[in-house]
Image (spheres, rainbow, N blue to C red):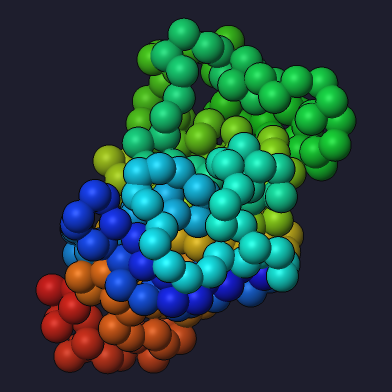
């Protein structure tokens, strides 16, 4: 589905991504791992057409169609959903307003009605009239995922979804991610929480100073202590 080939991206004169190549197939969870500052969020922004960074070279294709040169909303319209780092909710909007903000036509095309989203996230149903600033960290993350699903995506990009969450909420998030995989979604998971990523992903890429330095099935990575110590510090 998603294929990234020889991607180079920079912030001004600072080169961040250096020839990144990777792929995410339908029904697979692919974890992108690495220490802070290695370029993980830059990769997500590059896929979504956000600037900065500036993509200088390479290709990003989804279902065989090139995404480079498209604007972020045009990429989203190709059934790619983003769960951004930090949630990026609107403090003044209610839960229901977040889930209906795309408009009636977009909701009609989506398989995810508000009622179905509340079935997936019952806590959001209980808090449907609460505003963004009134939600807990876990509830905000649920809402960020639910909002992405309203776009009827086939691919989800999730940037640090477990950041700042209590362990019980991390476990709830993991169950949700696994359920989405069972529904056939492809997921690119950028995650600082190594053990959470290993609990759900099928395969993992490790990013080091802007380059992919390791790619393996998660089962193999779990038992590769030298690689995890060298590149992830564990």
Give the residue drawn at x 29%, y 83%.
213
Left or right placement of residue 15 versus residue 124 in this view: left
Q: Position of residue 57 (x, y in %)?
A: 43, 67
Q: Quadrant of the N terminus?
A: bottom right
| In the image: residue 196, left or right of residue 96 | left
| x and y, in percent, of residue 142 in the image | 51, 36
| Relative horizontal placement of residue 50, taking residue 94 as reference (left or right) | left
How far across and how far down the image is residue 127, in percent?
Answer: 55, 18
Residue under the image location 55 percent in, 65 percent down: 60
Query: Is the C terminus in the top left, top right, bottom left or bottom right quadrant?
Result: bottom left
Picture residue at 62% right of the left edge, 37% below the top: 73
Q: How many marks?
A: 0
- Can I make out residue 31 in this image? no
Residue 214 in view of the camera: yes
Q: Position of residue 7 (x, y in %)?
A: 42, 70
Q: Is residue 2 above or below residue 217?
A: above
Residue 49, placed above or below residue 95 = below
Q: Where 17 falls versus 140 (above or below)? A: below
Q: Is residue 189 above or below residue 199?
A: above
Name the residue at 67% across, 31% down. 118
Q: Nearer the viewer, residue 208 or 168?
A: 208
């Amino acid at each position: 589905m998603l294929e990234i080939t020889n991607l180079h991206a920079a912030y001004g004169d600072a080169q961040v991504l250096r020839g990144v190549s990777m792929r995410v197939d339908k029904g697979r969870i692919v974890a992108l791992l690495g220490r802070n500052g290695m370029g993980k969020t830059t990769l997500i922004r590059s896929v979504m057409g956000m600037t900065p960074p500036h993509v200088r070279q390479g290709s990003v294709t989804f279902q065989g169609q090139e995404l480079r040169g498209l604007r972020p909303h045009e990429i989203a319209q190709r059934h790619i959903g983003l769960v951004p780092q930090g949630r990026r909710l609107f403090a003044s909007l209610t839960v229901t307003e977040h889930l209906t903000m795309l408009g009636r036509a977009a909701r009609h095309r989506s398989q995810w009605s508000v009622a179905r989203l509340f079935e997936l996230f019952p806590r959001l149903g209980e808090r449907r009239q609460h505003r963004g600033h009134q939600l807990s960290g876990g509830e905000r993350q649920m809402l960020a995922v639910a909002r992405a699903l309203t776009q009827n995506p086939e691919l989800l990009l999730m940037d640090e979804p477990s950041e700042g969450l209590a362990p019980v909420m991390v476990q709830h998030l993991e169950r949700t991610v696994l359920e989405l995989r069972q529904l056939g979604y492809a997921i690119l998971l950028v995650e600082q929480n190594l053990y959470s990523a290993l609990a759900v992903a099928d395969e993992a890429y490790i990013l080091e100073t802007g380059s992919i330095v390791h790619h393996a099935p998660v089962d193999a990575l779990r038992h590769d202590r030298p690689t995890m110590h060298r590149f992830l510090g564990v």
